Image (spheres, rainbow, N blue to C red):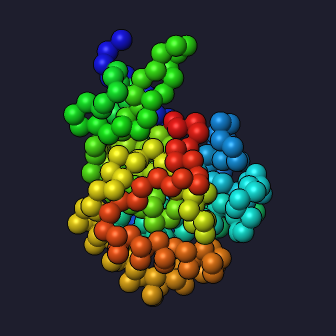
Amino acid sequence: MPATERIPQVGVSEPTGSEARDAARVREILTRGELTARGRVTRASNAVLLCDAVLDGDSLACVHKPVAGERPLWDFPDGNLARREVAAFAVCEAMGWDFVPPTVLREGPWGEAMTQLWIETAEDGGGLLALQDGEEPEEGWKAIGLAEVEEGRTALLVHRDDPRLRLLSVLDAVINNADRKGGHLLPTPQGGLHAIDHGVSFHTDDKLRTLLWGWAGDPLPEEAVEALARVAHALDGPLAATLAPLLTEAEITALRARVTALRESGVHPEPGEEWPAIPWPPV
């Protein structure tokens, strides 16, 4: 076995030429376009439909998640997962980043739903996660933890020491993402990175669960510091109005507190002791 084994990622594909459309037009199509279902993601825990959204001759492939298809969660009793996904997009945008694909809340054939642009992913998964021999990560990688790969044998699960992942880990800390798995990372053929599945975010309790602990306790990069300043300012303005119908008042208050705490500490958060730090399954 080689020292490093790549873990395959599962992604989706975006229609050719969609990246040329401006953001406003993409959101308009996602919000107002006529939806036609062309498949379903059967491995998802909630109902996830693959659709085409068509408006005035323009078509976009999208992911459509009806609220009616969500499984109730004991620890997320307020609101619904679809609205949290839209909130995650709004916060990411306010930070000045585009990790979360354009995401809207709309009425569809199956009632209220989250609709998100469908992203084309790199065929090799981007090489962001791997299994390595030994107890210490190789250069350019950060350790996540030991994983059992076969009976009687373990390997070190690692993620890339990648500046994109580092910034994404800050976004996850801001939104209190309880489920950052490897399969939620979507590297693009053009070298970009998107992240999906933010329905279990914004809880008022600390529930941060992620694979991206490689920078825990390290000083935040300047780009993250600037992004935190932007979102703090936005929470005193238009972002608060955007989030009001999506999250509870308590969740928005907790969001403000997390942003303030990150700015004051100036470091990446570290795993807590009251909540599992890594989601299961991790990939």
* Image-based side of 179 in relation to 9, left or right: right
Between 7 and 269, the one lying in front of the other is 269
Which residue appears at 52% of the width and 44% of the height? 278
Between 265 and 83, the one lying in front of the other is 265
Position of residue 84 relative to residue 143, above or below, is below
Looking at the image, can residue 115 be seen?
no
Q: Position of residue 20 (x, y in %)?
A: 34, 57
Residue farthest toward the front in the current orientation of the protein: 273
Q: Quadrant of residue 247?
A: bottom right
Residue farthest toward the bottom in the current orientation of the protein: 237
Which residue appears at 57% of the width and 47% of the height? 276
Looking at the image, can residue 237 be seen?
yes
Position of residue 192 relative to residue 56, above or below, is above
Between 56 and 207, the one lying in front of the other is 207
Which residue appears at 60% of the width and 74% of the height? 251
Position of residue 53 relative to residue 258, above or below, is above
Between 158 and 58, the one lying in front of the other is 158
Q: Quadrant of residue 38?
A: top right
Q: Position of residue 45 (x, y in %)?
A: 69, 43
Which residue appears at 30% of the width and 32% of the height? 137
Position of residue 191 relative to residue 35, above or below, is above
Q: Position of residue 47 (x, y in %)?
A: 71, 47
Q: Position of residue 212 (x, y in %)?
A: 41, 47
